[in-house]
Image (cartoon, rainbow, N blue to C red):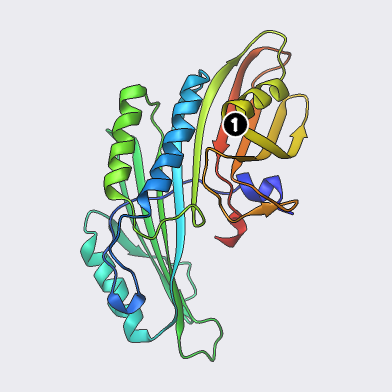
Amino acid sequence: MVSKKELFGGIAILTFVIVSTINPNFGYSESSSQSEPITHTLTTLLDTAEQENIEVNSWHTYTREVVDKEASERDVQNWLNEMSRDYPQLDWKEDPNWNEDHGIKRIGKNEDASTGMQERMTLVAYQPSPNSSTYTAYVLVEQEHTNALNENQIGQQIEMIDEAIYPWQTPENTYLRIEGEAKVAEGDSVTDQAEELLNAYDGNHIEQLSESTFASISAHSSNLPKTGLTTNGEDMNLQIAVRQEGRGLGGETNVTIGTPIITTEY
């Protein structure tokens, strides 16, 4: 069973989505066929939240993709050099805390204060064991947008993602999350609000946690693509969490809505 802590904890910055040209040795192909489900999912999350009067103040995407499980040292160096060369807008640095005896981690970052966008790409290659002659290589692509968005800005963001998404991003390897604030009607509880959001997304319960100031629901929504993640034998593709600010009924709540992922794998 997947815990709520695994599903909602531990991610601070999420997926930088751009078209990728990877070393052919690593098996990537150029195709935009995967962009539609990712863009559609984020659009569904944002549009439904807006309809439910949630003031969205951030959205996040996060993807992890294994590039090669048996890469040679030359393959790894070619890949690292090509990625750094292809994305000069990122400030590339080696991670000094990484264990260089068995691999390498290179991180590229970029932040645009005018748009509230933070971008981060992490390239990792490591030897599974000290005696291994090959490397496992993977890429983490992350983006966080932290400025509050009005309807027009949300549309612009969706267009950007639709034009620039990785061909290998799928509902199975990409986590999407939006966060915002909402007013709660006098007399309603956080559980009531979570239930209303679940209905808005046409979701069906899988698991639920309800406390006096916090409620979370794991669910399946027919409006969202399958994730391949199952809980209690059911496909889980939606998580909703509502936390109340202050005390008593009514007032404001912090709302988190996302597609679930097991963050401990990342």
The percent coordinates of residue 17 (x first, y second) are: 34, 50
For the N terminus, give its image quadrant.
bottom right
| Residue sitting at x 25%, y 71% | 82
Where disc 1 sits, the SS reads loop
Question: Where's the C terminus, which quadrant?
Answer: bottom right
Tell me which residue sits at (41%, 51%) in the image: 142
Instruction: Examine the image and state in which quarter residue 87 appears.
Output: bottom left
Q: Is residue 55 above or below residue 158?
A: above
Q: Hey, which residue is sitting farthest front in the picture?
A: 222
Q: Where residue 111 sits in the image (x, y, percent)?
A: 31, 44
Tag 1 residue: 202
Residue found 35% across the figure and 79% down from its top: 76
Taking 13 as reference, is 90 above or below it? Answer: below
Check disc 1 and give the amino acid type.
Answer: Asp
What residue do we see at 59% from left, 61% from top?
265
Of the pair 217 and 94, the residue shown nearer to us: 217
Compared to residue 139, the image places residue 99 above or below, namely below
Residue sitting nearer the eye, 175 or 125: 175
Give x and y (percent) for residue 105.
42, 69
Q: How crowded is the residue under tag 1: few (<14 C-alpha within 10 Å), some, or many (20+)?
A: some
Q: Residue furthest top?
A: 186
Q: Is residue 142 above or below residue 135?
A: above
Question: x%, y% of residue 36?
Answer: 37, 47
Q: Quadrant of residue 217?
A: top right
* Residue 22, quarter of the rendered image: bottom left
Asked if residue 133 lies left or right of residue 188, the reply is: left
How many marks on residues? 1
